[in-house]
Image: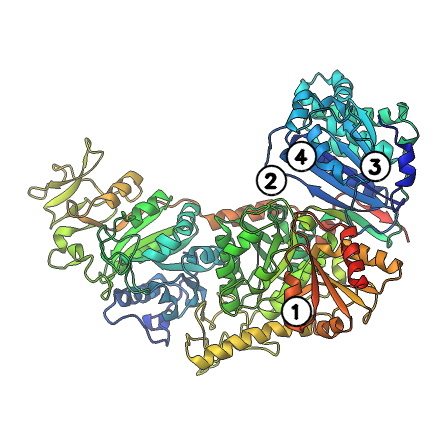
Amino acid sequence: MASAAETIKHQAPEDAASVVVRFAGDSGDGMQLTGGQFTLSTALAGNDLATFPDFPAEIRAPQGTLFGVSAFQIHFGSHAIRTAGDAPDVLVAMNPAALKTNVGDLREGGLIIADSGAFSARNLSKAGYDENPLEDGSLAKWQLLSLDMSEMTLESVKPFGLGNKEALRSKNMWTLGLALWMFDRDRQPIVDWLHAKFAKKPEIAEANIAALNAGHAYGETAELGYAFQPRHVEAAPAEPGLYRTVTGAEAISLGLLAGAKLAGLPMFFGGYPITPASAILHHLSRLKQFGVTTFQAEDEIAAIGAAIGASYAGSLGVTSSSGPGIALKGEALGLAIMTELPLVVVNSQRGGPSTGLPTKTEQSDLYQAVYGRNGDAPMPVIAVRSPSDAFECAIEAVRIATRFMTPVMLLTDGYIANAAEPWKMPDVSSFEPFPVSYYDQAPQEGEQFNPYARDEKLARPWVKPGTPGLMHRIGGIEKGSDSGNIDYSPSNHQEMTDLRAQKIMNVADDIPEQDVALGEAGETLAVVGWGSTYGPIQQAVARARAKGLSVAQIHLRNIWPMPRNLGELLKSYDKILVPEMNKGQLKTVLRDLYLVDAQPLNKVSGQPFRIAEIEAAIEEQLDG
Amino acid sequence: MNDMTPIETTLKDWETDQEVRWCPGCGDYAILKAVQRTMPQLGADPANTVFVSGIGCSSRFPYYMETYGFHTIHGRAPTVATGVKLANPELDVWLVTGDGDGLSIGGNHMLHLLRRNLDCQVLLFNNEIYGLTKGQYSPTSRPGTRSPSTPFGSVDRPVNPCSFALGSGARFVARGIDVNKKLTDAFKAAYAHKGTAFVEIFQNCIVYNEDVFSDFTDKKTSADTQLWVEHGEPLLFAGGTKGIAMDPELFGARVVDVVDGDWEAAGVLRHDQTNRALANMLVEMPFGEYPMALGVIYDDPRPTFDGAVVEQNAAASEGKSDDLQALIEHGQTWTVEG
């Protein structure tokens, strides 16, 4: 073990009241499970937190390989936590590959806990190590706690008579036990969870609990030295209320249910399996008692086609996918725009183009959402900024879709979908209901019903098939504005195209004005973002402001149309910086709409922004 | 179909005020009239009826029916119809498509519609050509079809719509001819069938593929070329002088001569519309050597997809609370004191 007590004094975390821990191991080591349970114990301890699960696209990647490493990062603390953390303070590495791929991120002086039992010659060679890094001094700038966790796990579960392979599966619980000791956490919720999870296999539950307790006991009894004393992170001050942890996928599912309830509509959800969007289909499939019909279609096109058919028949049609699937749905989106039917389309963005990076995050589908259809085909676009924000955004998407008779794109991303954060649970009854009424007034003798008649917001009536006297035909072919009959005439197409565009622009009158998330209007620099970059941008702006820099944060929820006051607000700043996990899509839209000199800060590595990256860009802007 | 109280209507009640815009002499006119003639006989309710179509000449159909109608996008009518029916299983859903729409661009959806057995009627207008895009060969065109995109003749083998349907798990397959009066019988049987009822209609495209079916639609020779099947009746044609027997060596059909009307002696089979093997044999008979099998070839209902979805939704909801607030607060929670 390298003695690094000296280093730690000089390399203390910038923020002693918060800690970043990363669990990394082989795909089969159960790191996501360990991380999930550590998250739960953190939440129950009252800390604020943010997580970042990062796993390979392969289901069972070959053991011990670099590309098979699965990691889970959690940032928790006694104050508001906005990101999953830049550099981990603690890295738990279950094998050489996990060490190799993650140790570079660890802050200097940070702690490595490694399972020396997994550092066999074979595993070392798979990870590309010539020498054992646990022994050759190459990890000297960090603290190293090298333990044979494999052996100690096997020892702890011996009484249960499991095979070697089965017994080693409890290694993650041994690790979790040690982590719980390190951060002074209660083991009981994990014990309860193990009992529930393995209710049908009590011997497995008991083995896991034994491993958990053994890991914890090891921390208590082994003399690990001063650097390894348990740390108690105080509970973060939080708004009073009832909390739970929530992932973006869960919050979107719950928000859609709430939206349907507020609209008074049954929901029809058409989906097709795709990472990272499938979680929403899975959640809703279990909730039929809330008036949801879920349909796993034969492809992405069928999923949206069925959702459109359901909307036509009077349900709230919803479909969900990721970029490649949204591309397939493009023509059908045009149909929903043309027939002016309500529809919510959730895009859980991932790295692209094509198959891209299925399990990694990116926010590169903004152009696709705003512009990605044939013809002049506008639709409202809303972007989710965090797991807990997803609930409200989903409700807002349903509200706009039904009020304006239009498809609405709800953008989230792989990071938000999988990440968990504490959620002050909303009171559904505090949301203003927006009940939908179907049109059912049959025309008088001699009059004709026009399905494209419009209300003051330019929305058309919604008539359910089955309503007597209102039989009518709709379709993707251009319809006369005054009759709903097929009409190719030049003046009518001009009028209908203008009406469709104006209807969507009218949404801007129905949404809140853009606020400034941090700082004031009229400062020197505005950092403008959207989606899951909210956390790192907020932290970076907060740090810059603490240094006395004149910088503000503006974070957009409504991507299309944009809030009425946005242009004026942006022009109140001397400079505009737009950090995005793409090559500059919002930046281009802002330049186009407002003729402002928005400067890009782009990252497309499949990883979220680090606070420091944005902070550096802010300083560069203000130096210049 | 649905178990609704029959409604009294006349043919006029099913016509819209829209000018019908198919080419003069197009077979579609006859099919439209046949549908409009059938609807009053079914006791169907125009307000409870939805026609869903894709893209192509046939897909203009909904505009001419005084019902609810949805003219969707190319090939995707089965998907929209699925959503309509699942959202409101009380509706009568009819799907109108063509050989290009239903078997080429929309072939995948057709397969899944049939295997799921959504309760609806599928009217597939087969004219072996792309009409609306001006005459390219289609997936049902015979090899050697010359068209703007195959000036030297097509070289790929066509799909047989009814074989495709049976292979996809269809529980109802019928065939008719646009101008033949018996088409309404097929529609009635299709409507009475609970599940996806697949009706292939040979439709004459007078502009791009005129008389492509005349080998068996020509009235002068139709007695010898058409085999109208009827449940429980012997498979006879050519005025009862010929019939279809089972050839055990071929594992298939054989045309046999019937002497003095003694079809049983000739080994002619009785049509059994619930016999899947027989249905496969009848739709696969190569025309020329065999007559064209027409009428209700297969009709053997199974539980429907929409029925199963409704049932599972109810069963899965049984005894469960629909309290959304409770769902939100479900799981491990903690309270932050004020």
Q: Position of residue A157 (x, y in %)?
A: 75, 20
Earlier in the chain: of badge 3 and badge 1, it is 3
User: What numbered label is drawn on residue A591?
Assistant: 1
Nearer the camera: disc 3 or disc 2: 3
Earlier in the chain: of badge 1 and badge 2, it is 2
SS assignment at label 3: loop
SS assignment at label 1: helix
SS assignment at label 4: strand
Q: Residue furthest left?
A: B260
Residue under circle 3? Answer: A110
Whether B154 is drawn above or below A511: the answer is above
Residue under circle 4? Answer: A69
Earlier in the chain: of badge 4 and badge 3, it is 4
Residue under circle 2? Answer: A57
Residue A120 appears in the rendering = yes
Disc 4 residue type?
Val
Q: Residue furthest bottom?
A: A446
